[in-house]
Image (tube, rainbow, N blue to C red):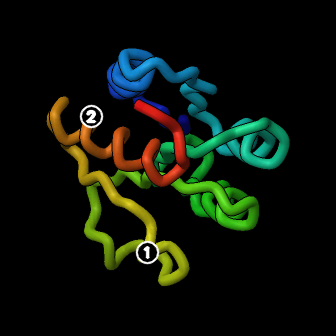
């Protein structure tokens, strides 16, 4: 999970763990996120678009190359995303706990992880 706001990261981490899954992260720095995206055994990913060091678009590109489903989080409109990411799942910030739970469950289903 890539998220540079600690409170949001803790909320997401808790929601994922409540569903019985392991969390890699939260990762707040772009360079670290790039390393993890390219080298860790992952099933799926949750990416905040704006993080320390820039946008997480290069991380998303690595995950797409690996064929991993992802959930993008942003306070901006989908049209601000690069065209190559328009088909990815999007969770608009701010979000409710229920919206987060639904988005994580959908992501896990796409990754063929039982919830």
Q: Residue at x 59, y 62 (%)?
A: 57
Q: Using a 10 Å C-alpha cutoff, classify the residue at mark 2 as few (fewer than 14 neighbours), some (14 to 19) or many (20 or more).
A: some
Residue 87 tag number: 1
Q: Position of residue 54 (x, y in %)?
A: 57, 53
Quadrant location of the N terminus in the rendered image? top right
* Visible residue check, residue 112: yes
In the foreground, 3 or 87: 87
SS category of the residue bearing label 2: helix
* Visible residue check, residue 6: no
In this image, 32 relative to 25: left or right?
right
Labels in figure, total: 2
* 8, above or below 58, in the image: above
Q: Position of residue 81 (x, y in %)?
A: 43, 72
In this image, 94 relative to 109: left or right?
left
Residue 101 tag number: 2
Q: Using a 10 Å C-alpha cutoff, classify the residue at mark 1 as few (fewer than 14 neighbours), some (14 to 19) or many (20 or more).
A: few
Residue sitting at the far right? 39
Quadrant housing residue 90: bottom left
Q: Earlier in the sequence, mark 1 or mark 2?
A: 1
In this image, 105 relative to 59: left or right?
left
Q: Residue at x 16, y 34 (%)?
A: 98
In this image, 65 relative to 99: left or right?
right
* 23, above or below 35, in the image: above
SS category of the residue bearing label 1: loop
Between the residue at mark 1 and the residue at mark 2, the CA separation in whole angstroms equals 20 Å
């Amino acid at each position: 999970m890539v998220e540079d706001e600690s409170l949001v990261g803790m909320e997401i981490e808790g929601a994922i763990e409540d569903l019985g899954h392991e969390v890699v992260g939260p990762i707040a720095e772009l360079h670290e996120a790039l390393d993890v995206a390219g080298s860790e055994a992952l099933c799926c990913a949750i990416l905040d678009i704006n993080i320390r060091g820039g946008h997480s678009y290069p991380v998303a590109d690595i995950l797409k190359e690996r064929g991993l489903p992802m959930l993008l989080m942003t306070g901006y409109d989908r049209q601000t995303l690069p065209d190559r990411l328009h088909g990815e799942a999007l969770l608009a910030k701010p979000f409710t706990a229920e919206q987060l739970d639904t988005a994580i469950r959908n992501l896990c289903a796409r990754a063929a992880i039982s919830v």
